[in-house]
Amino acid sequence: MLRNKKIAAVLALVLMFALVVTGCGGQKPAEQGENAVPAKEEIVVAQGADAKSLDPHATNDQPSSRVMKQIYNTLVTANEDMEIVPGLAEKWEQKDEKTWEFDIRKGVKFHNGEELKASDVKFTLERMLKSDKVAHIVEAIESVEAPEDYKVVIKLKEPFGPILSHLSHTAASILNEKAVTEAGDNYGQNPVGTGPFKFSNWQAGDKIELVANEEYFEGAPAIKKVTFRNITEGTNRTIGLETGEVDIAYDIEPIDKDKVRNNEKLTLIEEPSLSLAYIGFNVNKEPFNKKEVRQAINYAINRDDIITAVLNGAGEKAGAPIGPKVFGHNPNIKPYEYNVEKAKELMKQAGLEGGFKTTLWTNDNPVRVQIAQIIQAQLKEIGIDVAIETLEWGSYLDRTARGEHDMFILGWVTVTGDADYGMYALFHSSAKGGAGNRTFYENPQVDELLEKGRTSVDTSEREKAYFEVQKIVVEEAPAANLYYQTQNVGMQKGIKGFRLHPAGHHRLFGVSY
């Protein structure tokens, strides 16, 4: 620390001179003095799985969305505070209960040089409506019109309260019609967006490289190259941070958090997310077609053990299927208490006092494998003999969508921050399978309430409907809600401008080094 005021004053003048020279483009960083450190223009971001596709309509998984967030923009955006702000639409207006009008920004360029037009928005949303992976997000849309080059009119089948939230979803990223048409079936490996970073290269299973879009409408990114590395093992992501090979690492394992937190060269940021972890039951299969069995398993799970042993405290026991940060969350829904005797009593009521054998599926995520092992031991206490099966991520999603499982562990992120997205996909009968309802649960009353919640534009009416849905599904227990996840990111100390997004799709525009 400098204590001599004269030295400090001289140093300040030297720094001012250096800034002036740099601004004039005179000297290279190496010539600015022995201690000058040039800004880094490349970053490596590590996450636990490779993307499945970079076509927003071909998948709805987190690893893919995290990359797509950098490549594309949506009409409107949910910022880090979950406020709806302008995206490619600079303003919008609700003309009546079923009609929305959007004014598109002028002069925005796609990465292939094409100018963004209303026709691209129309093409995108109509294509999205045909996707079996993401159509449910915008299925309220009846038609999309482009009466002018920079004006889009969206007409809904019926009033739809969360329409803006749904249009902020990464799956609603705006595509260039020419690029999609030219690439055909290969578009998912050759994406073209309007976002701050352009696709450069993809080495499947290893890394995806992006470069700065210097013509980005919000300004050129400070970072000129982003490499997303697929590092499955959480400990290896932490080691990458420690060695400096990784600049930002998503999802630091609980066991490694203190390593990052206590390393003077690193920073750990941790905040609540919009994510729920749960055990799903295939209600079409015996004995999971019996409510008493599903409730028994809920009572037999000690959620505190999971949060303490596996998450190192980074989670909150879940009662309702949507967390406190989501609109429509019912705070009166409490988690199932840990009560082995109650669980045994319910098993007896189901005629299964002697227990049964079953399987619990998980993907090859170390945290989920550990959770599966704890649940395996806990269910043994009530006579349920559980065999754990670990599947590769793509196969896991495909086979649970087909209903081949007995029980499974999965997470659901309410990306839009609205109860409609958090529960319609998981519990509405029309969403069975890959759309989200992998428990194959069906209840006409729940369907009716979910439809009421999404078609009403009255906030209190919507909230009332969602409160009731949560009471019913928690009592009928097609799933065992485990915990609301706390998310984290580890990064190098020099990283500036990074903010966690509650949905887990962290924006890298605005980040500098």
Image (cartoon, rainbow, N blue to C red):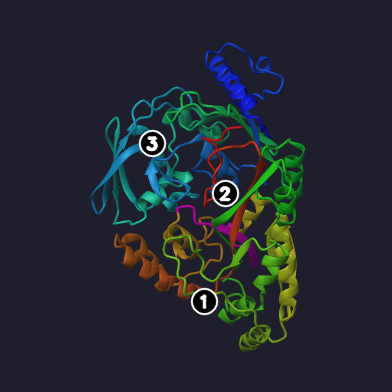
Tell which tag, 1 or 3, sits nearer the viewer: 3
Provide residue 126's location: percent of width, then percent of height.
Answer: 38, 42
Label 1 vs label 3: CA separation? 42 Å
Provide residue 476's location: percent of width, then percent of height.
Answer: 52, 76
Name the residue tied to disc 3: 88
Provide residue 217's location: percent of width, then percent of height.
Answer: 42, 29
Name the residue tied to disc 2: 61
Report the amino acid beneath label 2: Asp
Mark 1 burial class by Cα count in 10 Å: few <14, some 14-19, many 20+: some
Name the residue tied to disc 1: 476
Sequence order check, earlier mark of 2 and 3: 2
The residue at 33%/34% (across/down) is: 104
Sequence order check, earlier mark of 1 and 3: 3
Q: In the image, 140: left or right of 361?
A: left
Residue 414 belongs to the span the image colors magenta: yes
Label 2 vs label 3: CA separation? 23 Å
Can residue 256 be seen from the camera position used here?
A: yes
Secondary structure of residue under mark 3: loop
The residue at 36%/60% (across/down) is: 454
Residue 148's tag is none
Q: Are marks 1 and 2 in contact (CB under 8 Å)?
A: no
Q: Which residues are magenta?
A: 401-416
Provide residue 31's location: percent of width, then percent of height.
Answer: 67, 14
Secondary structure of residue under mark 1: helix
Is 203 placed above or below 363 here? above
Tell which tag, 2 or 3, sits nearer the viewer: 3
Q: In the image, 58: left or right of 462?
A: right
Give the position of the N terminus as an image quadrant.
Answer: top right
Q: In the image, 75: left or right of 20?
A: left
Is 24 placed above or below 158 here? above
